Image: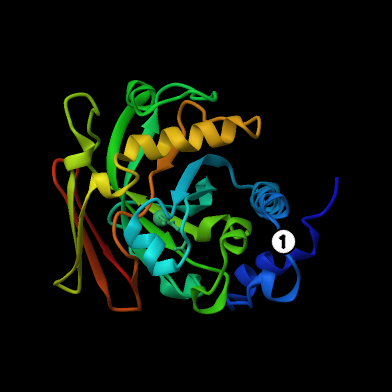
Amino acid sequence: MTGPGPFAEKLLAAVRDRTGIAPLSDEQELDEPTALEVQDAVVQARIDGGARLVGAKLGLTSRAKQVQMKVDRPLYGWLTDDMQIDTGQTVVCGDYIQPRVEPEIAFLLGRDLEGPHITASHVLAATEACFGALDVLDSRYAGYRFTFNDVVADNASSAGFILGGTAIDPYGIDLRLTGCVLEKNGELAHTAAGASVMGHPAAAVAWLVRTLAARGKGLEAGHVVMAGGMTEAVAVAPGDTVVARFDRLGSLEVAFR
Ligand code: OOG
Ligand code: MG
């Protein structure tokens, strides 16, 4: 078995040291196939360390996120069980380099999903439940400065994720219209609707399935899929509280210390 390679090693060291690094592409050319290999290596390193793959996340699926991060197309990464944060649990900022949070709609799959022709309706039909969720991001690149390939290599800035306490049957709900109000420390930060994510959050998941199919991969029953930030992400520090209020999907409140 080959090791994670020098690129992956740098990203893994950043996690261990909780210190941001320069973008990989600053030092050497990083193409997309290599970035995907690095992503696989950093995820494999977590699995080798005892973590379990529990799903996937989409990133940069909304205009708000693409503008904030100056990256103009979507990407994906993988979620492992050591990233799960329970609803009501306090998040320790010191566990991260530079945490940010963003509201998302998450899907819990009841059936496997794979293939080159999957659409949003297939995703909805395969969904066991939808949740309002918060993505806890942590770029391994200092100041969140990265190119598309850098952030692919960094597993889409994955660090933590929180599913809300309300599981909703996706039948009979139009997720395009699901509003979200994001508050930080009692003040309105951002607002969005589900349609901000590639027109429909399930369409974003379908895009992921088709993209994975081209690489011989798919999603499995029991996987959680985060559809991508609906609004800009907000930086968090000890003492902050973030509340995400979703129409029909309930609210999440997270305290940071
Ligand atoms: C990249 C991760 C993107 C999303 O939902 O857009 C992401 C970043 O913003 O650091 O998780
Ligand atoms: Mg996200």
Classify 205 as above or below 87: above
The amino acid beneath tag 1 is Ala
User: Circle 1 is placed at which residue position?
Assistant: 8
User: Image point 14% across, 40% down: which residue?
Assistant: 248
Which quadrant would the C terminus be assigned to in this image?
Answer: bottom left
Classify 90 as above or below 207: below
The answer to which image quadrant residue 254 occupies is: bottom left
Seen in the image, is 112 located left or right of residue 100? right
Between 27 and 185, the residue placed more toward the observer is 27
Between 82 and 63, the residue placed more toward the observer is 63
Q: Position of residue 119 (x, y in %)?
A: 40, 26
Seen in the image, is 37 located left or right of residue 59? right
Which residue appears farthest toward the front when viewing the image? 72
Which quadrant would the N terminus be assigned to in this image?
Answer: top right
SS category of the residue bearing label 1: helix
Seen in the image, is 141 located left or right of residue 73? right
The answer to which image quadrant residue 17 occupies is: bottom right
